[in-house]
Amino acid sequence: MASVIPNLQGHVIESISKTISRRFDHPHETLPDTNLTFLNSVVANLRSSAAEPQEVQASVHRLCIECKKLRDQLAPDAWANCVKQIRESDLLSLVHQDPFTSRAYNKPRGYAGDAVMMDYIYGLDEGWQPPATSLLGQRIFQYTISASASAGVRARREHLAEKLDEIARSKAKPEVMAVASGHLREASMSSAVRRRRFGRFIALDADAESLAEVERSFGRYGVQCELADIRKLLAGRMDFGTLDLIYSTGLYDYLNEKTAQNLSCHLFSMLKSGGKLVLANFLPTIHDIGYMEACMDWFLVYRDRMDMMGLTKLIDQADIRDIHVSVEENQNIIFLEVTRT
Ligand SMILES: C[S@@+](CC[C@H](N)C(=O)[O-])C[C@H]1O[C@@H](n2cnc3c(N)ncnc32)[C@H](O)[C@@H]1O
């Protein structure tokens, strides 16, 4: 699923327009259940099947399918009305026994998808103890952290770890920066980090608690923490010199087009010749999208291939050596890689 575009100008980008969201364009699909009658059976199943993992997971899976169908086929107002009804039903207190769902909904750090939530996802690979909750909550947690969006986040981490190792193989003492680093969990999958192959490794985030964890886990490998909001970067109030690799995962999903384009242009200007900017974003086609909005109050800015290419709009095309767009194996997260001439 990768397309390499040597230079944007004058090229017909054939592979790009495939993933454009097709809301309101499902002529062969059955009509969505706008009376939400499925809710009663999902609630009844969840209440009666707390000890049966397969039953719980089948119910949450059905809930995800129904929510996505509604979101795909309804006008935004009608979908918003469904979300309201779902939240007023008995369902919410059941699915909120899942720590992943409830943390997104309650936003203890002010936004969904904080680094602690990310660790719930990464914990599956790491064998970390799941957070304490009811038996039903544990069963739903097993579903949500195994669901394809969560699998995509784990693949994203792996992708960045590979990028880190790749740049350390191709260049001595490369200088890198992770923007909105969270807990920087990709670093623990990178042998180059553990072998201290980087000349500089900056982890920038606006969340002091997240950076304290980065310092605890990776300070000894030379990772330097920078507590800053991207607005400070954009205002030109931070000078890091030039870098070989700048990447950001889990941030662009929250940025509107204007900010995303400005930030991309600014980060690109911080690259050395031959340096790479790597950006990740959720695709609009993800299976869990309706559940995330209705039950987790987790609204993201989704981007397809065209949108990702659009992030380069403010960059002088003459400065771009090549652009590479790829999608991870779960088809949930898209990567844009822009190399400087
Ligand atoms: C979804 S987490 C992603 C963390 C990590 N990059 C990952 O992939 O697991 C989003 C991170 O963005 C940070 N963040 C959100 N808004 C920010 C801003 N305006 N400036 C800097 N960091 C920000 C949060 O503190 C959080 O750590």
Image (spheres, rainbow, N blue to C red):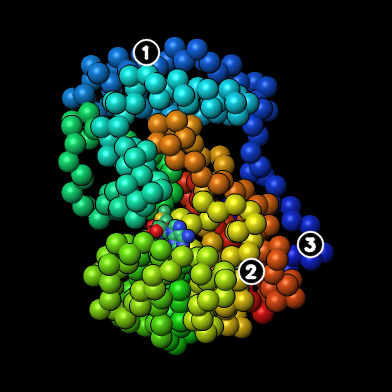
Residue 189 sits in quarter: bottom left
Q: Quadrant of ligand 1?
A: bottom left
On the image, numbered disc 3 is attached to which residue?
Answer: 11
The residue sitting at the right extreme is: 10
Residue 242, percent from left and from top: 54, 83
- Dot 3, crowdedness within 10 Å: few (<14), some or many (≥20)? few
Q: Which mark is residue 208?
A: none
Q: Give above or below for 319 relative to 22.
A: below
Instruction: Give the position of the C terminus as an image quadrant.
Output: bottom right
Residue at x 59%, y 16% (from the top left corner): 31
Measured as percent of width and height from the top left, residue 172 is found at 44, 87
For the residue labelled by badge 1, is the local secondary structure a helix, a strand or a loop? helix
Residue at (52% x, 71% y) in the render: 233
Helix, strand or loop status at disc 3:
loop
Residue 265's label in the rendered image is 2
Along the viewing direction, whichever of 241 and 168 lies nearer the viewer: 241
Q: Residue under circle 1?
A: 40
Q: Choose mark 3 or mark 1, whichever is in front.
A: 1
Q: Nearer the viewer, mark 2 or mark 1?
A: 2
Instruction: Measuring from the top left, give residue 106's x and y in whole percent.
Output: 34, 40
Q: Is residue 151 above or below residue 277?
A: above
Answer whether labels 3 and 1 touch (C-beta < 8 Å): no
Pinpoint residue 206: horizontal percent, then vertical percent: 41, 63
Whichever of callouts 3 and 1 sits on the residue coming sooner in the sequence is 3
Q: Is residue 249 visible?
A: no
